[in-house]
Amino acid sequence: MYKVLLVDDERTILEGIAQVVDWRSAGTELAGTARNGLEAWDRIVADPPDIVISDIRMPGMDGIQLAAKVAEHYPQTRFILLSGYGEFAYAQSAMQYGVKHYLLKPCNEAAIAEALKEAAAELDQSLENERFVAGMKERLQKMLPHVKEQFLKEFVTNKTYGSRDWDYYRQLFGLEHGDWTVRLLLFELEGAFEFEHLFAVKNIAEDILGHTLLSSTVGDRVLVVVPDTLPLQQLHERIAGIRETFVRYYKIDVTAALSEAGPFTNARLLYNETLAILPYRYYLGEGSLITKRDVELSETVVTEIAPDDGHLLQYIRTGRWSEADAEIEQLFHQLSDARLGIPVAKSFVAQWFMAMIRLGPAEAMNRQMDRFVALMQAATLSAVQALFRETAQELTKLQYESNVTKHSAITGKVLAIIDSHLADPELSLGGVANQMLYMNSDYLGKLFKKETGEKFSNYVMKVRIAKAKEALEQGGDIKIFELAEALGFGDNPQYFSQVFKKHVGCTPSEYGRGGQQSVF
């Protein structure tokens, strides 16, 4: 029921209308009466009615003045004016205040009821319109996030969108004020993920960044537009917080690319900038924040980082893993700093890898080529380096074991030569190396010491003294000069005795009679 306030300064008319009109049949109820405009206004302020039936001629405030004031403060209220024949033209001036219904006095209850029904119908229609508009607004509010996402997606990918579209949509989105210098932030999830993970990244980003203008999923990535209001360091910290939060909840890493600042109308260029720098996670690693500064090309000349066969391969070939590992670290660090195009970087790694695996046995080539495929498909340079390092370590170990076997065989030959030529006073490292094994004497000396822990000459002397002790311990009629000659001291038994005493602590004669004990 719509509430009606009846206003007239004549009591008989006021009471007559109040009693004769069938208010309920018109969908209304009489909520109160007033004797003039001032009293009516007080009642309206206290309890606003839906419909006012008012006489025009009243003391204090007439009906038109009342209609004007109600139209200003309660525009939804409907007015029915009662006027005499001579006042009708004056009454029509109230049209400027939205008054549509006029009744000439005297009027019967049927005319008043009809006017009430019309006013009630208008109110019904107004309510219906309000409900429709409210419903449209509600649906628009529900759709607005999707409209915003679609607009952003189209704006950065569709060349037909321009500044006019932005002017229209920013008003639609309630973004018509402010300085629209922005940065674009593009997120890419690493590894396998579900589509809902993209929405999780978007929601976390909106929450942590605090103020975002627009956001959307674009393919398998998330794009966020932020106003360029935060200090850059603070923005970087918040982006790091987005990654940390997402990784903590979903155990999936996410890489971000941040554009330079620019007007929103250049959003397509800023978006293309993020697309261009995002692949440089190949150098910086998954989970990085990448900016234009991070990927600016250094002035390193390409030829300066050509594959180094002279160092890395030499370390692998000689089984020296610590040196090879350090060389790999240096090569990849140099490659990362150069920020070359990714295909160029991969071509260098491919050359290094192929040169390296040629050092290994032929039967291992197929397995190494499988690893080569994985190495070329790796998403980041750090992953490439890990595979490369693993292969280099395997090959270095094989080379080391091969060298140890080879060195042991050489040392064994030297030991056999020493044993069979112990009586030769000319036995020397140079003679064994040059005349018997045809090797470099310096290399053979280092190899022999590495394998035995002794220099060649010291080892030979210790073997001769050990043999002398053996002979003396067996007893018998052995002459010192004969023993000296048999152990390579030639015809100098005195020198033999001096050397023996130095090593054993007594002369050969004393040792043979059971003298001092050996300190050898």
Image: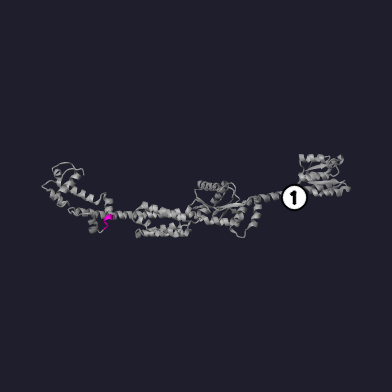
**Residue 467: within the magenta?**
no
Mark 1 surroundings within 10 Å by alpha-carbon count, few (fewer than 14), some (14 through 19), many (20 or more):
few
The image quadrant that residue 34 belongs to is top right
Viewport quadrant of the C terminus: top left
The range drawn in magenta is: 439-443
The image quadrant that residue 406 belongs to is bottom left
Residue nearest the viewer, comparing 432 with 196:
432
Tell me where residue 411 appears, x and y as whole percent.
25, 54
Tell me where residue 378 appears, x and y as whole percent.
45, 56
Tell me where residue 191 appears, x and y as whole percent.
49, 53
In the image, taking residue 426 as reference, residue 64 lies left or right, namely right
In the image, taking residue 289 as reference, residue 11 lies left or right, namely right
Q: Residue furthest left?
A: 477
In the image, taking residue 2 as reference, residue 372 lies left or right, namely left
Q: Residue at x 17, y 46 (%)?
A: 498
Q: How is the image coloured?
A: one colour
Q: Main secondary structure of the magenta part?
A: helix
Q: Residue at x 59, y 55 (%)?
A: 267
Q: Residue at x 62, y 60 (%)?
A: 160
Tell me where residue 249 appears, x and y as whole percent.
51, 46
Residue nearest the viewer, comparing 334 with 467:
334
- The reply to whether residue 170 is in sight is yes
Q: What type is the residue that disc 1 sits on?
A: Gln
Local secondary structure at mark 1: helix
Q: Which residue is mark 1?
A: 125
**Residue 441: within the magenta?**
yes
Residue nearest the viewer, comparing 237 with 30:
237
Q: Report the number of numbered marks.
A: 1
Please, is residue 509 above or below residue 361 in the view? above
